Image (tube, rainbow, N blue to C red):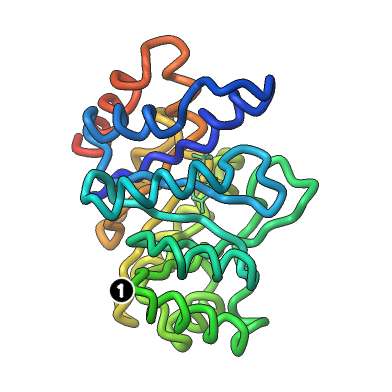
């Protein structure tokens, strides 16, 4: 199973003081050395963490074969133009609201079929493997398959925030969603809100082939260093 480490929060720390450190690109290299299979970074419309220069530097690293880059992006013309130019190996389309603390909920693919289909084909033509970040609903999974997206990333944020029976029910939705997506011929990833404490049941979903994890890894890195934090998540996934 592929571990994509989301490095946005390295840039969040830098932007809190508008300094030049900590450097997210150096962090990406450490993540890869520690066992990350890929680097995920979200170029938000407001550039609140990762900025254009970061994404360009990450794309140079990815075209040199040093990292596998997954660019998270809103489904906008501006972001599509940037991705088409930078050609990351993967693009993950996410919903984006300016005031949100982090990505809330999945993308409404079913409600915007034509626009999403056009964006998927533009990104695919540029050589990017496109992933749709969606909630585990049948409608969104079927819509993603219908527009030709090769990958979906199931939103685990709700699962992570729930407890007890509600969490167990959400786990079943994720399990069934992953199964349906594979039946429809798609590759299934998952991410958001995952930690060492809550990821075991998600990792155990047999249809999943990748996780994207950010906040908890960077938080753990404060106490044990980034290399160890990434290595511990990778080891937990293998276990
Ligand atoms: N996957 C997607 C699509 C995301 O938007 C995010 C957050 O940027 C993540 C995964 C990682 O979430 P977290 O930082 O909560 O691990």
Q: Position of residue 197 (x, y in %)?
A: 42, 28
Tag 1 residue = 182
Q: Position of residue 173 (x, y in %)?
A: 48, 62
Tag 1: Cα neighbours inside 10 Å, few (<14), some, or many (≥20)? some
Regarding residue 166, the answer to whether it shows in the image is no
Residue that lies at the very extreme toward the top in this rendered image: 223
The quadrant where residue 207 appears: bottom left
Tell me the element at label 1.
helix
Image check: 47 left or right of 60? right
**Vertically, is 172 above or below 1?**
below
Q: Quadrant location of the C terminus?
A: top left
- What's the residue at 49%, 49% (across, down)? 168
The quadrant where residue 131 appears: bottom left
Q: Nearer the viewer, residue 86 or 10?
A: 86
Q: Position of residue 42 (x, y in %)?
A: 54, 49
The quadrant where residue 206 appears: bottom left
Regarding residue 64, the answer to whether it shows in the image is yes
**Vertically, is 201 above or below 145?**
above
């Amino acid at each position: 199973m592929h571990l994509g480490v989301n490095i946005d929060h390295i840039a969040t720390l830098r932007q809190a003081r508008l300094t030049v450190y900590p450097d997210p690109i150096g962090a990406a290299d450490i993540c890869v050395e520690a066992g990350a299979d890929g680097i995920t970074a979200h170029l938000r419309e407001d550039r609140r963490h990762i900025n254009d220069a970061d994404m360009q530097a990450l794309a140079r690293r990815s075209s040199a074969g040093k990292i596998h880059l997954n660019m998270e992006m809103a489904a906008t013309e501006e972001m599509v133009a940037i991705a088409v130019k930078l050609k990351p190996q993967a693009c993950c389309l996410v919903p984006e609201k300016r005031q949100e603390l982090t990505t809330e909920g999945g993308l409404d693919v079913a409600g915007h079929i034509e626009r999403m289909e056009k964006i998927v084909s533009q990104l695919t033509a540029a050589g990017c493997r496109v992933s749709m970040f969606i909630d585990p609903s049948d409608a969104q999974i079927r819509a993603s398959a219908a527009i030709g997206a090769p990958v979906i990333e199931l939103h685990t944020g709700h699962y992570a925030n729930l407890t007890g029976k509600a969490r167990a029910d959400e786990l079943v939705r994720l399990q069934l969603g992953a199964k349906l997506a594979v039946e429809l011929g798609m590759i299934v990833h998952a991410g958001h809100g995952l930690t060492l404490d809550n990821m075991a049941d998600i990792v155990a979903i047999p249809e999943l082939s990748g996780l994207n994890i950010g906040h908890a890894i960077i938080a753990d890195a404060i106490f044990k260093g980034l290399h160890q934090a990434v290595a511990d998540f990778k080891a937990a996934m293998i276990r």
